[in-house]
Image (tube, helix red, strand yellow):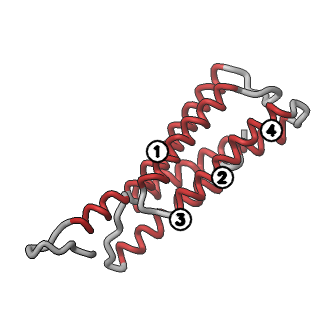
Amino acid sequence: MMRLILFNTVLLVTIGYVWWRGGKPERWTVTMFAAAAMATYLLSAMTLSSYVEIEWQRVAIDALLLVGLLLIVAFADRFWPIWCTAFHVLALAGHGVRLIDPLVLPAIYYRVTAWSAYPTLLIVAIGAWRHRRRLLAGRHDYSWTFERHATRLSTHSDGRAAEQ
């Protein structure tokens, strides 16, 4: 029970901070984490979670979160999503290890799949903090790569491409 309280506290503090200080990629990412956490909680309420065998519903939730993270990596004009995605791949790999070796202890299976959320939340919070620092320094901080490219492709009155 204490682990659940700790995680919910970390999640809620991170959500609040990111929505207060972060840009669009940070907000999208933390919203996806919140949705995945809610789906996991609903799953736990409907089934008895023991981590004795692979929980395919959790694999599906983690796989959908991975797809969302990969989209953030592909389109965000940030570096931190790569690290979040890497930590989340570790969580998915935990499911794979359990599939390959059913003798992996349930406690280890739980730790590998659940605890990777902490560094990802920390990374998103750091991303929001860095976003805010760039804005306070007076720099423009593009949220998405296509925004940067659109700005570079805009033209001056004489037809030259603008470089910002």
Q: Which mark is residue 141?
A: none
Foreground label between 4 and 3: 4
Whichever of callouts 4 and 3 sits on the residue coming sooner in the sequence is 4
Identify which residue, 128 or 153, lies in the foreground. Answer: 153
Q: Nearer the viewer, mark 4 or mark 2?
A: 4
Instruction: Residue type at mark 4: give it.
Output: Val
- Looking at this view, name the residue that lies furthest to the bottom: 137
Badge 2 marks a residue whose secondary structure is helix
Helix, strand or loop at mark 1: helix
Which mark, residue 87?
2
Reading the image, the residue beneath label 1 is 31
Q: Is residue 62 above or below residue 80?
A: above
View extreme (front): residue: 159
Residue type, mark 2 in image: Phe
From the viewer's perspective, tell me whether residue 70 is left or right of residue 154: right
Identify which residue is drawn at 55% across, 40% down: 65
